[in-house]
Amino acid sequence: MIELRTPAEIDAMRPAGRFVAETLTTLRDETRVGTNLLAIDRRAHEMIRRAGAESCYIDYHPSFGARPFGKVICTSVNDAVLHGLPFDYALKDGDLVSLDLAASVDGWVADSAVSFIVGTPRDEDLAIIDTAERALAAAISAAVVGRRIGDISHAIAEVAHADGYEINTDFGGHGVGRIMHADPHVPNDGKPGRGYPLRPGLVIALEPWFLETTDELITDPDGWTLRSADGSRGAHVEHTVAVTDDGPIVLTDRSWLGAS
């Protein structure tokens, strides 16, 4: 069931959005060559506890997960692009890192992701991150009353295809509210003018993710981490967005923190 939120409920979601934005910005600023993925998870856990927030991941066990996730943040590195389960790995120079965090504050959820490079960047990595970020901006611009889910999906795909990337539609955006994953599903490719009509009060997480040379995924033995089938690298970005009569509101906006 797709739920629409009142203006008061959207305002009530703002603290969750701010918390997720602040936490991701802090984690990105603190992550460097030599940082262990388990240390990132511990730091995120500390910030969640200190804020009185709740993790949406630690007990999460959907049908595609082998077991409850058990950590509070997804840390995907290089050819891992989604659902990266933190493990004992110290980041190396040039690693492409994606951090994905969802948390609940006062019963409302926000979900966001950021991709970046530690140390010396490769041009290919900078390019795919830039494409993902521009695709997210296009998706947000399309999230207006009177349009449809397909318009958002098409906006994402136009950017990706123009830059030569293929698209996997198994995982994409989704509704957000009292729970992390709700209807509707928002694929990263679709036909304009199709799908659920965008109405005031719809709150959705938009999350373009692309791989350099494939659209096929494989699952790690940990039962969670999704990697490219050919070993190419990927990027993943995400914001929680409210559709309103006054235009889209990015609840997880990081720009006020001096971050993209």
Image: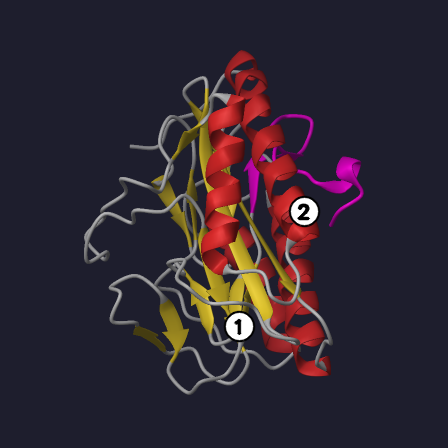
Q: Quadrant of residue 10?
A: top right
Instruction: Determine whether, in the image, residue 87 is placed left or right of residue 19.
Output: left
Residue 187, percent across and down? 43, 57
Question: Which residue is rendered at x = 44% and y = 71% of the image?
Answer: 80
Residue receiving disc 2 = 141
**Dot placed on the residue nearer the N-terminal end, 2 or 1:** 2
Q: Which amino acid, mark 2?
A: Ser
Query: Which corner quadrant holds the N terminus?
Result: top left
The reply to whether residue 251 is in sight is yes
Asked whether 169 or 12 is in front, the reply is: 12
Question: Which residue is rendered at x = 67% and y = 51% of the image?
Answer: 30
Asked whether 190 or 140 is in front, the reply is: 140
| Res. 210 mark | none
Residue 159, percent across and down? 64, 68
The reply to whether dot 2 and dot 1 touch (C-beta < 8 Å) is no
Residue receiving disc 1 = 234
Magenta range is: 239-260
Q: Which amino acid, mark 1?
A: Gly
